[in-house]
Amino acid sequence: MKRLTEGLAWAKRLENERGGALIEMAMCLPFLCLLVFGVIEFSRIILDCQVMNGMSRQGSDLASRGWPLADEGATPGVLTALVTQGAPLNIGTQGRIIVTEVTYDPNGNPTIADQVPSSSGITVTSRIGSGVGNAPNATLMPVNTTLAKQTVFVTEVFYSYSPFTPLGSFFSGSIGSTLYDVAYF
């Protein structure tokens, strides 16, 4: 009988405890917010990288099919098509696209035959090189000696990532604030 009353006293004490759920919520909420903000920010970074990857591949593909790199009269160039395609990223103010045509001189050295950067956006320099016509002035990665008689089109896309959530500054600090993608065709 004594055990029964002790059990009831313990049960009555549990009924009188108030605020327990509030304390548990206060302890769990920071971890829940960290998880939600992390998923949102990481998803945005992945989406931006996927859009950039599609733009760089599309640019090099169009250039290799004979589209002009810059606008020629009424014919839109590769750069105009890419800036239009990059509208979700706001490439005009937060990014830069550089399309480069690389040929090889008679000695097999890569030479920039033509290079067209987008007219507005962030200030960056091409990782391929600059200076049209000066041989050798292009750095191609990956280096391939079998390309010595071919033309290579390179599209570089730079994008200045801006965080959306308070946790975003951590992600942009760990991956860098300028995202980069390149395609070789």
Image (cartoon, rainbow, N blue to C red):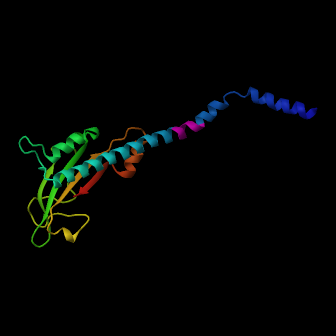
Q: Is residue 75 above or below residue 105?
A: above
Where is residue 48 drawn, in percent x and y? 33, 45
The count of marks equals 0
Residue, far bottom: 107
For the point 17% across and 52% down, the residue is: 99
Q: Quadrant of residue 185?
A: bottom left
Where is residue 95 drawn, in percent x and y? 24, 45
For the point 11% across and 47% down, the residue is: 70
Position of residue 144 in the picture relative to residue 15 (left or right): left
Q: Nearer the viewer, residue 115 or 167?
A: 115
| The magenta segment | 27-32
Quadrant for the N terminus, please: top right
Residue, far right: 1
Where is residue 163 drawn, in percent x and y? 36, 41
Position of residue 102 in the picture relative to residue 184 (left or right): left
Does the stretch in magenta take in 30? Answer: yes
Q: Quadrant of residue 39?
A: top left
For the point 55% across and 36% down, the residue is: 29
Q: Main secondary structure of the magenta part?
A: helix
Does the stretch in magenta take in 163? Answer: no
Residue, far front: 65
Q: Is residue 64 above or below residue 32?
A: below
Where is residue 117 drawn, in percent x and y? 16, 49
Q: Is residue 115 above or below residue 13?
A: below
Q: Nearer the viewer, residue 75 or 115?
A: 75
Position of residue 54 in the picture relative to residue 17 (left or right): left
Q: Nearer the viewer, residue 127 or 18?
A: 127
